[in-house]
Amino acid sequence: MIKAENLFIKTKRKREVLLQKFDLKCQKGQLTAIMGPSGSGKTTLLDALKNNQQSGLSYSGRLETKGIIKYVAQEDLLHGFFTVRQYLQHYMHLNYSGISTKDRNALVEDIASKTGLKSALDTKVGDFLFKGLLGGQKRRLSIALELVSNPDVLLLDEPTSGLDSLSAICIFEILRDLVINGLCVVCTLHQPSSQMWNQIDQLVLLSKGYTCYIGGIQGAKDFFIHSIGKEMPSTHFNPADFLILQLNSDFNKDVDPSAMNQKFIAWCNTNDDLEANNCINIPDVKKLVEIIRIQVAVSSKQNWAEALRIHAYQRAGGFQKFFQLIQQSMLNAIKNPGIIGVRLTICSILCFMTGFMFFNLESSFNDADVVSRVSFLFAVDALMVLLSVAALPFFLVERRIIEKEVKNQLYSSSCYELARFIISLLGIALISIISSGLSAGIAKLNGFGIFFLTLFLSLMIAECLSFLMGLIVRHYIVGIALLAEIYGIFMICEGFMIVKSKIPGYFIWLHYLAFHTYSFKGFMINEFSSIGSFNSARFSDGKAVLEFYEVNNLEIWQIILILILYIVVLEIISLIVLSVIFRSKKLQ
């Protein structure tokens, strides 16, 4: 059940009102449809009912909710690497513990059957990299995943948008079945077909944030006849089309949402039989639900919701969710080419070329050899980190999916971040060991172990920065530009292009801030500290090179510790940002 009283929403800066004072009550066994022209406040209202309050908006009013509430966004935010069966099983693990494999498979089959996905159980969801489910199938899967939680209230934003008429009707039939089974369903719609219109129990009409009508579909006809003077055509006209025409003030200048709101209030106050004319008859619906449940029991066909109630599975705990998220992250890293595959390929090609470009450096100890060694270390330090920006677009895609699942209380943001971080360690370790072998190994540089560890920590810092940037920005182009700018500044100040003592005082803080500084120093110390002599008039040995580049003020263990500290600090910042942007604010 959801009950909103005096709900009022406006923007903080411009003080533009998005939703005027609004009252609504949605009950079990009821399908509530929120309709209105574009920009009328439908999605804003639905977000508020789920406590998905958006930044930059000010909320007031009182919201009372009971039971488990799930939200299905207008866009299908789904991982593309799962099959339908794997996705449903994944949600089963995130929701319940102690459920046997047999029962889990039976429930997955039943949910897929109820939502028309049985024939696509072993089909991958798909994304922009490879094809998978069709649009209507993805929408049904989005609904099916939330049904796994056995919710009491289901909120859906434009569940039929962008679908053909048959797919839209099929999805609406699924929603109607859920209502018959006792759920409270609230959805936003643009222009439902006549078949869908006749299945609506409670209708909410909005225009420019004003409430123009709340009640049954028959009451809407009466309201527009008696209060607005507009009669709804009885034949050859979709009632939903007629209503939208009367509410759209962008193209119809005669429409005044504020005046219509006042007329609706006056009509409510003067209509003595409002409950009977406008609202569904709740007792009759409950009676219908009981009759259907009896028929189901007699036929021995239990639906998925009843099966979950009968077995009374325990809700999954934090450790189970954590290990399930580790499995998800591992599957994502393996099957999503953008997470590890693409970066491993481009890093391998770059390092292979770099290694052979500086092939067999240990055989030469003249002036040119010193320049080659230092240039090699700078190239690996700078370019390998720069290539990490390739992961940002994939982080941004995943961020939206995680935000949806966290706000639907499937798991906590900290649980997800810890699981993601662990799998990132393994993925970056793989990239680092292969890259080190193809670069330092072919070039035969000194201290392979320290080289690998320094590169690994540098790439982990870049990974953490990319993830943090993916949380802060909304578009990958902006994120890539910002990261490239940051890395470019760090390269200039790290001590290769200009030594520390020559950096202007007003830029010296960037030298200490840049993690490139410490990784470059780590590479340099590892390479040159063990070289006893050079055949060079300028540099007598490796220590002379270190003194020239002013990288002899730290020990290698101190550099490793600083790089680890960078990772810890970035992870803490990411956890704080995650908890802030994914939190749900409660309306009092």
Image (cartoon, grey):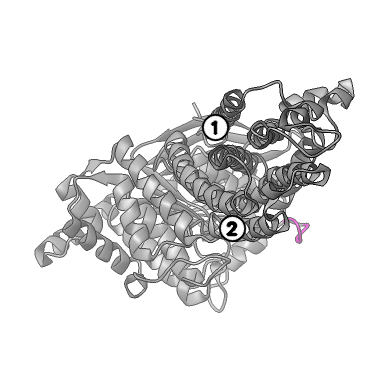
- The picture places residue 372, in percent across and down from the top left corner, at 77, 47
Instruction: Say whether residue 212 is visible.
Output: no
Q: Secondary structure at mark 1?
A: helix
Q: CA distance from mark 2 to mark 1?
A: 57 Å
Residue at position x 61%, y 25% from top? Answer: 562
Residue at position x 69%, y 49% from top? Answer: 363
Instruction: Say whether residue 110 is visible.
Output: yes
In this view, 459 is above or below 117: above
Position of the N terminus by quadrant: top left
Residue at position x 58%, y 49% from top? Answer: 436
Mark 1 Cα shell of 10 Å, populated few (<14), some (14-19), many (≥20): many
In the rendered structure, are the residues bearing label 2 and label 1 in contact, judged by CB atoms less than 8 Å apart? Answer: no
In this view, 155 is above or below 317: below
Earlier sequence position, callout 2 versus callout 1 = 2
Q: Which residues are magenta?
A: 249-253
Task: Kindly identify the amino acid type of the residue bearing the numbered disc 2.
Answer: Phe
- The picture places residue 547, in percent across and down from the top left corner, at 78, 26
Q: Nearer the viewer, residue 406 or 58?
A: 406
Q: Nearer the viewer, residue 394 or 156?
A: 394
Q: Quadrant of residue 313?
A: top left
Mark 2 vs mark 1: in front: 1
Question: Magenta stretch: dominant SS?
Answer: loop
Q: Which mark is residue 224?
A: 2
Q: Nearer the viewer, residue 481 or 298?
A: 481
Q: Is residue 80 magenta?
A: no
| 145 with respect to 401 (left or right) | left
Q: Secondary structure at mark 2?
A: helix
Task: Kindly identify the amino acid type of the residue bearing the numbered disc 1.
Answer: Glu
Mark 2 Cα shell of 10 Å, populated few (<14), some (14-19), many (≥20): some
In this view, 91 is above or below 236: above
Q: Which mark is residue 571?
A: 1
